[in-house]
Image (cartoon, rainbow, N blue to C red):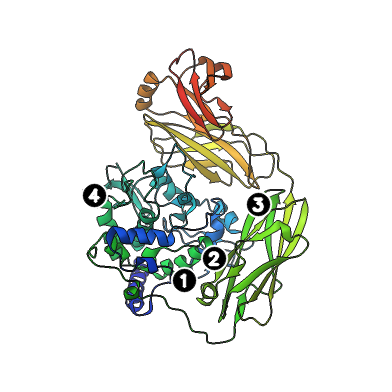
Amino acid sequence: MTMATTAIKSAFSTALILCAWAQGWGAAPIGYYDGLDGKKKEALKAAAKAAVTQHQRLNYTNLPVYWEYSDVYPELVESQSGDMCKRWWEMYSNNIYLILPNQTARQSFSANGMQREHSVPKSWWKYLNDVEYTPAYTDMWNLYPSDGPANQAKLNYPLGEVGSSVTYDNGSCKVGTAVTGQGGGSGRVFEPADEYKGDFARSFFYMATVYDDLPWVVNYMYVQESWPTLQNWAVNMLLQWARQDPVSQKEIDRNDAVENAQGNRNPFVDFPELAEFIWGTRTDEVFNVEEQGGQITPPITGDPELTSPANGSYVDLGQAVVGMATSGAVRIEGANLTGSLSVSLSGKDKSMFTVSTKSIPASSINMGTGYLLEVVYTPASLGMHEASLLLFDGGLSGSLRINLRGEGCERPVLSTLTAYEATDVTDSSYVAHWSESPEPVDYYTVTRVRYYEEGAESETYDSPVNSLEFTDRDPEVMESYTVVSSRLGIHSQPSNSIIVNSGSSVTGIMAEMPFMAGEIEGGFVVIADSEHTNMSIYDLSGRLMLCEPVVRGGDTFMLPRGIYLITTDQSRRPVKLIVR
C-alpha cells in the first residue's frame, strides 16, 4: 500500500469516527451489547466477553471460503488476461493475489501459495501440545489470509516495533529485535505496516477478552488471568497503535462479514474507545453503550426485495466422499425486508444438504452488507445429487429458488509419498522435495518438526506442488519434514522423514539425549545421530507394543493414539511420546 493510499485511509478513518459518534458503529443486533452498560475496567471486560464469546466454530480448511467475503478488496483488479478479478486483502505484504475466473476461493488460496495465519500464534496456548482443542484455533478474529514467506518469517514472535537490527523486511512488515521495553523477553518481534497496526491491536484485544482463560504457555504478551490478561508493555503498545490507526471501513465491513460467518462481532471494532475504558485512559469512567453511538437500523424506503443470488441460479458444492461433508456459502443480498427471511430445502436429494439456519433476521439483509448462508453437502451415495434452496417470507411477494448440486465420490486411495533430501540448503533456507503423487490430489501437506533443547515443535504447510521452500531456517536447530497428499479431505500415510542437520547446538543435545522421538500426526520419526538397536515401545500399562531390531535417524513409525515410553540399547532412559 502506497503512502498516498495510507494517507487517504487515515483521513477517511478519522472522518468515519467523527460521524460514528452521531450515527453509531456497525450493525450489532438490538440488545447485543446491553450487558456492557454501567460497567468499567475488569467488569466491563467480563461483560464484553459474555456478549461475544458464543459463536459457531468454523472448519479450518474452509477458512478461504469465508475470507472471500471478509478479506477481499471492494474494487476488482484486472488480471494479465484482461479479466476483472477479486483481490485478496492480506495484511502481510504488498503482493497482488487474485481469485481468477473459474477458481474457487480455496483453489486461488492454494495456487497463490497463501497461508492461514494466526495473528496471536497458536503455539502460545498449547495444552498437552494440542492447539485445536479450543475455538480460538479457527476464530476469524484471530485468523487472516497471509503471504507465505511473510507468515514463515513471522513465526511465533510477538507484535512489537523493530529496532535497528532487521532480519526480514518485505516493504510492508518487518521482523527483528524489539526496541527497548518491548518484546516481553522474545529475541525478535513482528511489526506490521502502520496502516494495519490498529487492525492487529483490536484482534489482540479481542483475544485477551474472549480467551482470557486459555493456558497461555508463552507469556510474551498474555498471562493466564481474567484480568488484565495482557502484559503491561503490550497494553501500552497496543493502545498506542489503536489510537494511531483508528477503525477503518475495511474493519467495519469485515465485522459484519465475520458475524455472518461465525455469529459474533468484535466489540473493539464496534466501540473504538472500549479498550481505553478497559485498559487505558478511561478506566475510571463507566461505559454506556448509548454514549458510544448505539444501534441504528436503516429505514424501510421501498418494497422488500432480494437482489442476489438470482432466482434459478446454481450453486455447485463440488465433489465429496460418500459419508463425508463439504461446505460452501451462498451470499444473500437485498433490502427493505419487513420480517425474518425463511430458509428451507426441497427436492429428492434434500436429505444430503443442510443449511446453517432456517431463519435470517431482516436486519442482516437490510444493512446492505449481505448475509453468508453456509450450505453443507454430505453425499449418501455415488453420483450427482441436487436439491433446491428456497428463500421466502420477510415481506416478499413470492419465493426465490437456488439450485444446489454436488457429486458423491468413492473414498480415494492415496499412495505413500517418498520424501527426498532437501536441496539449496543455506544457513537461512532450504527446499523440501518429495515424489509426485500418482493419483490426482488437491494439495500436499508438509509437517515440519524443529528440535529444541526444551522439546520439539511442529507446523504444517500446504503446497500445490511437490516442493516447498522454507526461508526461516535456523542453522543451530535440527529439523525434519514428512509429507502427505490430500484429496477430498482424505490424507495419505506420512512419507519417510528427512532430517535437515543443524550446527553445534544439536551436538550438545544429542550428547545428552542420543535418541529422540519427533511427533508427527499418527506416529513419530526417529531422531538419532547413530544406529540404535532393539527399540522397544511400551504403553502406560507396561505392555510391549512394538519392537524393532535396528532403527536409524529418519525412520518413521505409526501407532494408535496414546502415550508411550520408548527405549533402545543405546538409550535406556525412557523417552515419552504422545501420539494423536
Q: Residues within 10 Å of mark 3 (few under 14, many from 20)?
A: some
Q: Mark 4 points at which residue?
A: 179
Q: Which mark is residue 240?
A: none
Q: Name the residue under label 3.
A: 325
Where does the image place residue 480, in percent across and percent down from the top left?
Answer: 48, 32
For the point 42% across and 56% down, the residue is: 93
| Element type where label 3 sits in the image | loop
Q: Name the residue under label 2.
A: 86
In this view of the protein, which residue sits in the foreground, 97 or 215? Answer: 215
Where does the image place residue 342, in percent across and percent down from the top left?
Answer: 63, 72
In this view, the mark in front (4 or 3)? 3
Determine whether label 4 and label 3 are within 8 Å by CB: no
User: Separation of disc 2 and disc 1 at Cα?
Assistant: 29 Å
The disc labelled 3 sits on which kind of residue? Ala
Q: In this view, does 337 lie to the left or right of 197?
A: right
N-terminal of the pair, mark 2 or mark 1, is 1
Residue that protrudes farthest toward the bottom in the picture: 302
